[in-house]
Amino acid sequence: MELDIHVQPRNEENFVDLDEHDRVSVVVHPSEFLNSDGKRETFDPTERDVRYRLGSRSTLDDGAGARPTDDGEVTETTTGHGDHERTTEVLTLTFPVEQMGLGRGDDTIWLYWERDASGEHGSSGTDTVSVYGGTPSSRELQELLRRWVRLWSRY
């Protein structure tokens, strides 16, 4: 994971309610990582083109996912305390929920940054989320049907 992200920064539980939320905010922090050549590389989202996709892993792997609603907002954030306090610029983006391909019970959300306009995947990051609402999964519907059949078979 090359990207350091935080989904729903004002929401400590990082929950996404598919029935209530139209949009989700994501903060992209500068990050440092080893590239494929083993060299240290820095990703500064405030200096990169805004070419992001957000969603479930399968949705992004299929070339889909939510795109930011605009170019985002650069803000400052402070981390640490005392001598370790550090202020950095971060990029806050907003994404439409309906295009993320998330389902009830999903617990991870992915952010892809595309290297160029062709859509070539460049870097990625994840954050833990709790997804509520939406259409029940087929597994949930099967379990509900089993319960219903057991209940009616007693009569």
Image: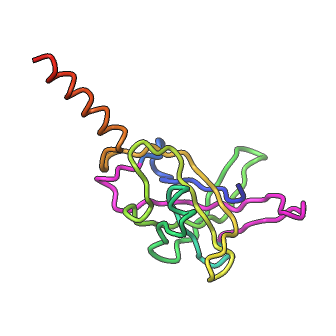
- Which residue: 51% across, 67% down? 93
Please, which residue is most extreme toward the top here?
Answer: 154
Observer-nearest residue: 150 or 95? 150
Please say whether residue 131 is one of the residues in the magenta stretch: no
Q: Place residue 3 in its image quadrant.
A: bottom right
**Looking at the picture, how far across and down is residue 45, in whole percent?**
66, 69
**Looking at the picture, how far across and down is residue 108, in whole percent?**
53, 47
Q: Considering the image in quadrants, where does the C terminus appear?
A: top left
Using residue 3 as the reference point, say whether residue 107 is left or right of it: left
Q: Place residue 130 in its image quadrant.
A: top left
Observer-nearest residue: 140 or 82? 140
- Which residue: 50% across, 59% down? 55
- Which residue: 69% across, 65% down? 123
Using residue 151 as the reference point, say whether residue 143 is left or right of it: right
Using residue 57 as the reference point, say whether residue 31 is left or right of it: right
**Looking at the picture, how far across and down is residue 12, in whole percent?**
48, 43
Please say whether residue 24 is one of the residues in the magenta stretch: yes
Please, which residue is most extreme toward the bottom here?
Answer: 117
**Looking at the picture, how far across and down is residue 10, in whole percent?**
46, 51
On screen, residue 80 above or below 29: above
Q: Tally the numbered discs.
A: 0
Please, which residue is most extreme toward the left here?
Answer: 155
Q: In this picture, which residue range is highlighted in magenta?
A: 16-45
- Which residue: 72% across, 54% down? 86
On screen, residue 143 above or below 15: above
Q: Considering the image in quadrants, where does the N terminus appear?
A: bottom right
Coloring scheme of the render?
Answer: rainbow
Observer-nearest residue: 148 or 56? 148
